[in-house]
Amino acid sequence: MLSYIHWNPDIFAFHIGSFGVRWYSLCWAIGIISVTLLEQRLYKEQRVPDEKFEPLFIYCFLGILIGARLGHCLFYEPSYYLQHPLEMLLPMKQDLQGGWHYTGYEGLASHGGTLGLMLALWLFVRKTKLSLRFVLDNIAIVTPICACAIRLGNLMNSEIIGKATSVPWAFIFERVDMLPRHPGQLYEALCYAVFFFIGWFIYRRRPQLVGTGFFFGLCLTLIFTARIFIEYTKENQVDFENGMFFNMGQLLSVPFVILGLWCIWQALKKENVEEKK
């Protein structure tokens, strides 16, 4: 008899009085703080003035959060949220009696978060006059560590679960059912951690690639290619995905992979031209 991993952690990491801090929120905070500290280190190494770096955190935080929330609402549950537009941005839900209660943000989409981040960085470069490719490359070097933390938050929440399986490392998400399932969240988290070290390794050996769009392309290609394959191990998030060869997460990943490959190609082509001069 296989011994599977029984998974049923408390959704709260700790309590302060009657207020509970959820693991998901804590993982988000750890991810954002880690990215901010690493990004600050990169900017210092590249001699970017502090006053140009300081607004970056708020741009990234709002861009990711708003983009991820709108992405989930519009990509996965448009019929509901277009009838309840306030619930898109408020961390609350309206009950059948018309009252409101706090739920936190139930549903954040990584594709929407990526689009929101790209828009936020475009606004950031308009304000700071930095190169867009320079900013995108730097944020791409450190972004996978934040993506890793967020997927660990999903794991602690027992959400975005995998399909039933008999692999020996299967998780039984007791909060969902008693079936052994792929830990899709853990697969993604491990991939993103590896991608962070790959990007950091390349940056340390070829820092001159920052500003070419190479790291931005590498990040998009690695993350969303992994997402396409890992989606085959995960349950569909919404009913309309049932029967689709590519689910919504996979369909939304394809344009990012194409964009990523194009950015890598353009960056390497530019570097080759400069080396021949």
Image: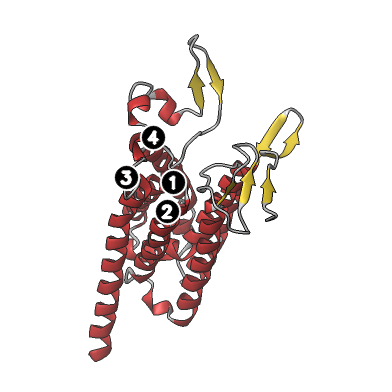
Q: In this rendering, would 126 be left or right of 196?
A: left
Q: Residues within 10 Å of mark 2 (few under 14, many from 20)?
A: some
Tag 1 secondary structure: helix
* Amino acid identity at mark 4: Asp
* Amino acid identity at mark 3: Met
Q: Which residue is mark 3?
A: 244
* Amino acid identity at mark 1: Ile
Q: Residue at x 47, y 49 (%)?
A: 234
Q: Which residue is mark 4?
A: 239
Examine the rendering and report whether any part of residue 53 can be seen: yes
Between the residue at mark 3 and the residue at mark 2, the CA separation in whole angstroms equals: 11 Å
Q: Which residue is mark 1?
A: 64
Q: Position of residue 246 (x, y in %)?
A: 32, 50
Q: Earlier in the sequence, mark 3 or mark 2?
A: 2
* Amino acid identity at mark 2: Tyr
Which quadrant holds the C terminus?
A: bottom left
* 1 and 2 marks in contact (CB < 8 Å): no
Q: Compared to 236, does 94 lie above or below? A: above
Tag 4 secondary structure: helix
Q: Earlier in the sequence, mark 2 or mark 4?
A: 2
Between the residue at mark 2 and the residue at mark 4, the CA separation in whole angstroms equals: 16 Å
Tag 2 secondary structure: helix
User: Depth-wise, is mark 1 or mark 4 nearer the camera?
Assistant: 4
Q: Position of residue 215 (x, y in %)?
A: 39, 69
